[in-house]
Image (cartoon, rainbow, N blue to C red):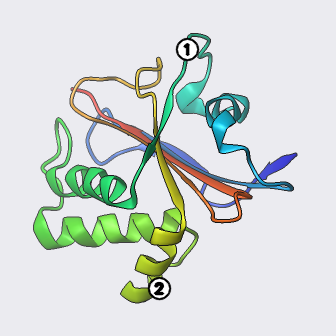
Amino acid sequence: MCRSTTRTATATSPGPNGCFEARTFEFAEPLDVDLLANVLLSLRLQCTDGETRRFWVTGSTAAEAWRALFAASSLGGVCNTGAHGAYGRLAAWHSMAGIVGLEETASAADVEARVLEWSWYRFDPETVWFEGVDWDLAIVAVSPDRTRLTVLAATDTD
């Protein structure tokens, strides 16, 4: 039914105790976004591994995803001061481009147009993978034809 594609990673952040997961999936048929929580739980993501209780996914906007990415990149985490202003914006911009399948070198107009075409969601950051100490990031984006899904999850602790 689906295959995992590019940008699969789970790694330690620049701080001592953070981790992230970034994965993209392509589906043969359009996703039913009403079943997005079940889809996420079926994808064998590390950030949802072993989750059995009620799991929520809610609609979001590209602007909300941007704010979460900008805050994480510019402010950093528990033991990291972040990239600050302009460099934080650049890192968030590169993340948004990657989520929608564009290269970092894509023009601002191309990134903005693609980002606004996609559907954005947040998911439950209270699974056992998330530390819940300083900040957690749990973003899902779905392509306009609903055959591509990108997950970006990150957590930090002290």
**How far across and how far down the image is residue 27, in percent?**
80, 54
Residue that badge 1 annotates: 54
> In this rendering, does residue 11 appear at all?
yes
Between 104 and 147, the residue placed more toward the observer is: 147
Up/down of 139 relative to 106, above or below: above
Quarter location, residue 41: top right
* Residue located at (41% from left, 78% from top): 112
State which quarter of the image contains the C terminus.
top left
Up/down of 121 relative to 45, above or below: below
**How far across and how far down the image is residue 10, in percent?**
52, 43
1 and 2 marks in contact (CB < 8 Å): no
Q: Secondary structure at mark 1?
A: loop
Q: Residues within 10 Å of mark 1 (few under 14, many from 20)?
A: few
Q: Residues within 10 Å of mark 2 (few under 14, many from 20)?
A: few
* Residue located at (47% from left, 85% from top): 110
Instruction: Indicate which disc, 1 or 2, sits on the residue closer to the N terminus.
Output: 1
Q: CA distance from mark 1 to mark 2?
A: 37 Å
* Residue located at (17% from left, 35% from top): 78
Q: Is residue 26 left or right of residue 141?
A: right
- Give the residue type at disc 2: Asp
* Residue located at (53% from left, 57% from top): 119
Q: Is residue 128 left or right of residue 84?
A: right
Residue that badge 2 annotates: 110
Up/down of 101 relative to 157, above or below: below
**How far across and how far down the image is residue 25, in percent?**
70, 52
State which quarter of the image contains the N terminus.
top right
- Give the residue type at disc 1: Arg
